[in-house]
Each structure stands twice: as C-alpha cells, then as structure tokens.
Image (cartoon, grey):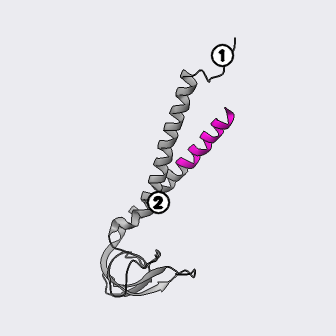
C-alpha cells in the first residue's frame, strides 16, 4: 500500500512539473511573439551543428530589420535531413531591441512545437494517473482491499 502511494505521489510530481514547464515555456514564447516584428528572410547557407555520422543542419538566415539593417543568424533548431535549403524563403521573428536573437520558422506555430510535446506527455500521464488511480480506488472499494477498520 505504501509503495502504491509513493509511486502515485512521485508520478504526480513529475506530471505537474512537466505541465508547469510547458506552461512557463508557452508564456515565454508568447511574450517573444507578442513583441516580435515579422519579416521575410532568406536561408543563405546550412551549418552542420553536430558531428555524429550524418550530423544535423541549421539554416543560416539573413533578413533586413525595419530600420534597414542587414542581420544574419543561425537558427537554434537543426535537423537531419535539413528542413530548408539555400535560397529558401523563411519567416523571421525578431525583437527590434535585439535583432540578432531572431527565430526563423515556416509559420509562427512552429515555435510552440516543444510546448505541444510537453502538453501531450503531461496530459497523457495525468490521464493515465486518473485511470490507474480510479481503478485502484474501485478495487479498494468493491473488492475490500482496504485495511479493516479499527475496533
């Protein structure tokens, strides 16, 4: 009985931690998107960012700010195979105060990919906990698994 309660407590802490991280990450991304300026950019090159067998590739992007300044940056997300190729157009979001901290995406919702994964894992664990907890609760209630009441 103690081990079941300990496992339930540990899984609850993990589940709510995952959901809290997802919520905080979503808030951070939303703040960035709300203050960001959108513009068109172009992928000027691909940079290999990991050295394992095939490696992954991040696009190197160039765009012009609203004031006309030309800025280049390497996107923080890389992939194999590469998602973009040289001369591909790319949507750029940047903070006018810090244009070098820009993000290049196909669409704004791409920024929320990690949040969606964390939500799926967190709510999946929450749902599993409800089902398992409910099952044990019913077994305790109907099968008489509970400890006898003290006299």
Q: For this rendering, which residue is in front, 11 or 53? A: 53
Q: Going by the picture, which residue comes out furthest to the top? A: 151
Q: Is residue 55 left or right of residue 75?
A: right
In reply to whether residue 8 is colored magenta, the answer given is yes
Question: Residue 149, labelled with which disc?
Answer: 1
Residue found 53% across the figure and 37% down from its top? 132
The secondary structure making up most of the magenta span is helix
Say which quarter of the image contains residue 112: bottom left
Residue found 41% across the figure and 86% down from its top? 72
Q: Secondary structure at mark 2?
A: helix
Q: Quadrant of the N terminus?
A: top right
Say which quarter of the image contains residue 73: bottom left
Q: Position of residue 121 (x, y in %)?
A: 48, 53
Of marks 1 and 2, the one in the foreground:
1
Q: For this rendering, which residue is in front, 68 or 77? A: 77
**Disc with the residue nearer the chain's start (1 vs 2):** 2
Residue 72, placed above or below residue 112: below
Label 2 Cα crowd, 10 Å radius (few <14 / some 14-19 / many 20+): some
Q: Position of residue 151 (x, y in %)?
A: 69, 11
Residue 38, placed above or below residue 62: above
Label 1 Cα crowd, 10 Å radius (few <14 / some 14-19 / many 20+): few
Residue found 47% across the figure and 85% down from its top? 47
Q: Secondary structure at mark 1?
A: loop
Residue beneath disc 2: 25
- Let me know if residue 31 appears in the view: no
Give the Cα separation between the discs numbered 1 and 2.
Answer: 47 Å
In reply to whether residue 112 is colored magenta, the answer given is no
Q: Which residues are magenta?
A: 1-16
Residue found 42% across the figure and 79% down from its top? 82
Q: Is residue 84 left or right of residue 151?
A: left
């Amino acid at each position: 009985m103690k081990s079941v309660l300990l496992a339930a407590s540990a899984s609850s802490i993990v589940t709510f931690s995952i959901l809290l991280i997802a919520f905080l990450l979503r808030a951070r991304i939303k703040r960035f998107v709300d203050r960001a300026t959108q513009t068109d950019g172009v992928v000027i090159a691909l940079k290999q960012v990991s050295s394992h067998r095939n490696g992954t590739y991040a696009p190197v992007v160039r765009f012009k700010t609203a004031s006309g300044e030309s800025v280049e940056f390497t996107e923080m997300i890389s992939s194999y195979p590469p998602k973009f190729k040289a001369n591909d157009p790319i949507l750029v979001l940047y903070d006018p105060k810090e244009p070098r901290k820009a993000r290049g995406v196909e669409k704004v919702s791409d920024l929320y990919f990690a949040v969606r994964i964390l939500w799926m894992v967190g709510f999946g664990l929450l749902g599993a906990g409800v089902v398992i907890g409910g099952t044990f609760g019913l077994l305790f209630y109907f099968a008489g698994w509970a400890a006898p009441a003290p006299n």
